[in-house]
Image (spheres, rainbow, N blue to C red):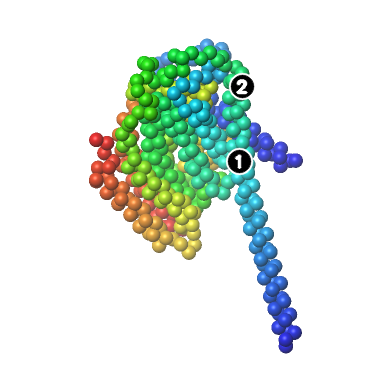
Amino acid sequence: MNDVLDVLLRLVAVLVAFLVLPLLVGQTEHKVMAHMQGRLGPMYAGGFHGWAQLVADGVKFAQKEDVVPTGADRRIFQLAPAIALLPYLVVLIVIPVGPNGFVGQIVDAGLFFVLAVMGVGVLGALMAGWASANKFSLLGGLRTAAQLMAYELPMLLAAASVAMAAGTLSLPGIVHAFHWWWVPWQIIGALVFFTAGLAELQRPPFDMPVADSEIIFGAYTEYTGLRFALFLLAEYAGIVVLCVLTTVLFLGGWHGPWSDSLGWVWTLLKSALLAFVVIWLRVSYPRLREDQLQKLAWTALIPLALVQIALTGVVKVVIQ
Amino acid sequence: MGQGLDSLRKQIIETVVDVAEVTVQATHHVAADYFDGYSVVGLVAVLGVLFVAVAFGAGRLLRPVAPTREKMLTYECGVDPVGEGWAHTQIRYYVYSFLYVIFAVDAIFLFPWATIFAAPGFGGTTLVEMFVFIGFLAVGLLYAWKKGVLEWT
């Protein structure tokens, strides 16, 4: 009975984190972007600095008519948002937040599992792009697929470098093995991982698949209401997962003063800082062109990731 | 003499059976633990499906349904669509997908190797072996680059 309760509690905690953290990131993005651009951002909803803006948005989305174009591939079109969203929920359960088993579920090959499941989300965008029966959506979906192929590799290679350093694929194991000097040692890998993650999420400056000036809104053009909201939620859940994962792999996760009792605070704090950087990059950089996108991945990030692997391997063998 | 041999044989068989039983139990145990972890992961997936189902169901109750012919037309870019939605496009990405597959296979080898290459009994030689492997792939990438595969136009 206790075991069942324990599992239930973990499941509920993961679902709550999955629904609340993306909203926090979204609201922060509203406000931070606004202030960086000399605006105020939402101020009305909820009274205090527009804190309830995203709740209001959600209510609006739920009340909107659900339009499926006659020309679309109906089933696939309707299923796509769920496919895009769910991988991020599943990933959250294996991410360690604090020491002493503060994790939804320890999985032996956690790192491998996370990378594999995160790749599935892109299928959602591809399905949406194909099923919409819309030329721009199709282009957007194909761009998404190409982007996944280009950026999945540097991401995998950078993650492999951490696995080499720690000698394990278990996420809590990796954080356990962490020492502060890993940060300078793995800095190339960290930058490559974070950049590639941004590109996989199609966040600016890597948002060519949804470039509004060229292809309207890419794969999501035909979506309205709740299904559109789920796509948006997937994007922000993706930001949360990417930031927490970068924290766990490269920034020492729960390590920090009083990590025994306050470990989870450190994880969240570091992730929040990274989320701020994600927003900052959106405001600062112009969109990369499609060929520049591919070029950056194949001619800069992959060689850099390979260099990091060599560096990790040599240092690890020398200090053993 | 014959009796002694018999009892020895009996003993050996018993020991072998014992060992086998222990091994079977151990693998059972490890396998059970291993899949226990993933059963919770499976539960999360079920929870996710439930969440989406409830969201879509609630949405169905909340939203209006008032379709018209114009509304159901593909939006595209605001102008009435011309021709077919699944238009012919030149997909220039297919070469990238070849490159991707090659490196993805490499990554599969890389991960298990990463957990043991610095363990006692491995070390420098194991590292060099992987460098040779990755070196081949890197040369392949360099070749593709030189051939202009990574150029757009």
Q: Is residue A146 visible?
A: yes
The residue shown at (61%, 21%) is B58
- Viewer-proximal residue, A6 or B88? B88
Labels 1 and 2 in the same subunit: yes
* Residue at image coords 62%, 53%: B31
Q: Along the polypeptide, which appears first: circle 1 or circle 2?
A: 1
Q: Position of residue A232 (x, y in %)?
A: 49, 25
- The relative height of residue B153 versus residue A284 in the rendered view (above or below) is below
Which picture quadrant has residue B97?
top left
| Disc on res. B58 | 2
* Amino acid tagged 1: Gly
Query: Pointer 2: residues within 10 angstroms few (<14), some, or many (20+)?
Result: some
Q: Quadrant of residue B24?
A: bottom right
Could you tell me the amino acid type at mark 2?
Ala
- The tag on residue B42 is 1
Relative image position of residue B67 (x, y in whole percent): 51, 14
Residue A130 image offset from top left, x and y in percent: 42, 30
Residue occupying image coordinates x 24% and y 46%: B146
Q: Characterize the local packing of mark 1: few (<14), some (14-19) or many (20 or more) Cα atoms within 10 angstroms.
A: some
The residue mark sitting in front, 1 or 2, is 2
